[in-house]
Amino acid sequence: MSGTGALKKPVSRVVTLTASSALACVFAFAALTGVQAQSNDSLAGAIKVSPNAKLLLVADELVYNRDVDTITAQGKVQIDYDGNKLVAREVTYDQKTGRLLATGNVQIVQKDGNQIFAEKIDITDDFKDGFVNALRVETTDDTRFAAESAERQGGNVTIFNQGVYTACEPCVEHPEKAPIWQIKSRKIIWNGTKKTIRFEGGRFELFGLPIATLPAFEIADPSVKRKTGFLIPGIHYKSQLGYGLTVPFYVALAPNYDLLLSPTIYSKQGLLAEVDFRQKFDNGSYSLKIAGIHQLKTGEFAAKSVDATHKNRGLIGSTGQFDINPRWTFGWDVLVQSDKNFGYTYGISGFSDFYRKNEVYLTGLSGRNYLDLHAYKFNAQEATVGDALNEKQPWVGSLDYSWTAPQSVYGGEFNFDMNARGTYRSLIDKLTKGTGIGNIRGISGSSERLSAEAEWKRTFITQGGLSITPLLALRGDGDLVDTADLTRTAALRGMATAGMEVRWPVLFSTTSATHILEPIAQIFVRNNERYFGQLATDQLPNEDAQSLVFDASTLFERDKLSGWDRVEGGTRANLGLRYSGSFNNGWSAYALAGQSYQLGGRNSFASPDLMAVGAYSGLETKASDYVAMAGVSNNNGLTLAMRGRFDEKTFEVRRGETEVNYARDAFSVGLRYAFIQAQPKYGFDVDRHEVTGKGSVRFKTNWRAFGSLTYDIRNNYVSDNSIGLGYDDSCTSYSITYAESRTVKTVAGVTSISKPVRSIGFFLSFRTLGDFGTKQGLTE
């Protein structure tokens, strides 16, 4: 041993050293400590080491060679320093050159979770420069690098030679197989300071097959959520616009605000420019969008349409929401555009709805108090020249306030609710079909209403399980109307209600099942509703109570009307029976059936208002239609549900729906049948029958096929159908769909089916790289 100047010492136990000792300084500084001082990328590790940390070394032998001034740990070497671990067959530290050499199945697990695998790692003691052979890096966000060799420069740049990059996990059963996608590149340059990954001489491969050659491009480090640069392009098509290509460019201006430039070149209409600016604050955020185009071929649009009569078109839109304090929130969603159809025609994201709602709002919530203040302006993005449709869309201001007493009042719950509404529209909104005053969606001119209601109720439960809930409510409304459509200009109305609900749930149990039967009875005594009916002198505007569906889910509502402009009056009783059952074999069932009765006073549903609310509802007769719903389900994913409304005399089906669904593991299917009897006053002269089917199946773990079809039984045609194929895993998502839609039109008693509108859409997403696909689908 003296001839070589080497001292060989077996190490069969864990060696624990303080950071102040010489050997600890060697390994701590050379292997780990210098990392933290230099860089934050995966090779450098962002390691933070405590100055009081201890180094633990495990090895079969520890050799100190005085002649060459090296220290070598051999055989199953493990080094643990402040949560950072290195494993290798041999680790040698050269004190003259300041380099550390680890060889043999080297694995470094850094404190932040990143892992480095290599056969050989040769680095300087300060970790600035180094060379790695047969390298593999796995980061905490599941991205992976592999290379024949790698070099470190300046402590912040890693160059992978003949490298491979992917965000896909290797196949568990066949790890030798290529991942779903990968980028093979002559050089991959990972800059830890700039947080970028640059590929030079790259090739993109999908399922091991080369798809595209990439001479040079750059992406953000996967750990970076915001980085200036180009995003994945998108393609779209519309017959009047032509084919479009969007190349977005993202600008990270600051940690709390950014900019997105999205120019789109259309083959027919030219350049569409879109700019999105977003900014975040501690208490909220807002966005601003600007878009514009100079149309090259207005003749592609229908003659005399809005699209054809404007060459220069654009819009400015903004959304935002801010928390003024923990109780109050302020926000907006507004749009101003050069013409009424630009956002819809070009599918501007966030502003492309046909019926557009501009709004500004203020909401507050504290304990059991709630306030909502809204201002709306509704618009229709139609192509027709003139403002006939838009003039029918209202300006609306509304206020809602609700308060629930924090303590019980005479042993019960006390609620107070208030609503105020102001509406203005330029032109009366009247249905095309039907005649007379009873087909008006909204009056012209202005109308205002202020309503307030107080309600008290308390539940008593007897020893026999009978639940009794008395209820008292008092409501008042004041209306002002300024319009030529109605003769009434002002009105006051009040509603006093005394009610009682009785429930008696009864439990039946057997060795194999549990059943609950619950008879329910309600009665509400109140005065008649005022200012509605067939005569114009009777009526007040109805802006927010136009929707009415009477079924089992609304049977026990005290007021079955949907808004504040109408209030149900007269004395009414609701009777029903509820059932629920649970079985030991995994099945469960439920059912509810009942009927409503007008016992006295004026029936609010018997004389339809301006919008014919109440007609065909099933509530217009003294004894209402029967309503029922029932369903069963089991643990295997099968559900069956039925809902219906039936004539009170003949039991004829007025409205019905049946739905069956099955979902199990990788397979799901559903079938729905819906029927609505003819409603001439609403523009539906014939019965409507419709069947909708849908299904999906997953195969080979990640693949799925799906489709749907809607068939109009009455008119004997398929209104909508689609089919698609998709793939999803941890790094890739892909789908392609084909769809058709048709419409039916009846002119002078002749029914015709339109030609199908076909669309093809696809979407492709590579994790860490970006998304690529259609914006609106490819449409004929």
Image (cartoon, rainbow, N blue to C red):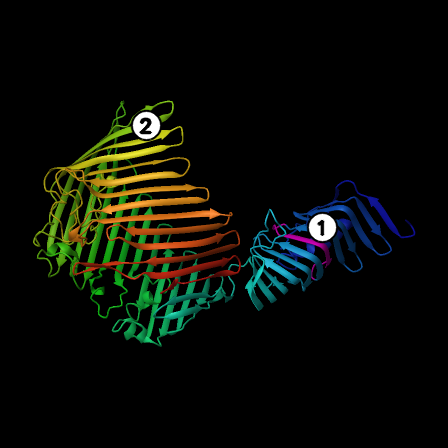
Whether residue 482 can be seen here: yes
Q: Amino acid at mark 2?
A: His
- Image check: 521 left or right of 254? left
The residue wearing badge 2 is 515
The residue wearing badge 1 is 105
Tell me: residue 698, above or below residue 582: below
- Disc 2, SS: strand
Q: Position of residue 89 (x, y in %)?
A: 75, 48
Residue 285: quarter of image: bottom left
Whether residue 124 can be seen here: no
Closest to the observer, 755 or 295: 755
Q: Amino acid at mark 1?
A: Asn
Is 707 magenta? The answer is: no
The magenta region covers 111-128
Tell me: residue 442, above or below residue 663: below
Q: Position of residue 561 (x, y in %)?
A: 20, 46
Q: Earlier in the sequence, mark 1 or mark 2?
A: 1
Disc 2 crowd rating (10 Å Cα; few below 14, some 14-19, many 20+) is: some
Is 125 magenta? The answer is: yes
Q: Residue furthest right?
A: 3
Question: In which quadrant of the rendered image does the C terminus lie?
Answer: bottom left
Q: Position of residue 255 (x, y in %)?
A: 49, 61
Q: Residue at x 46, y 50 (%)?
A: 704
Residue 631: quarter of image: top left
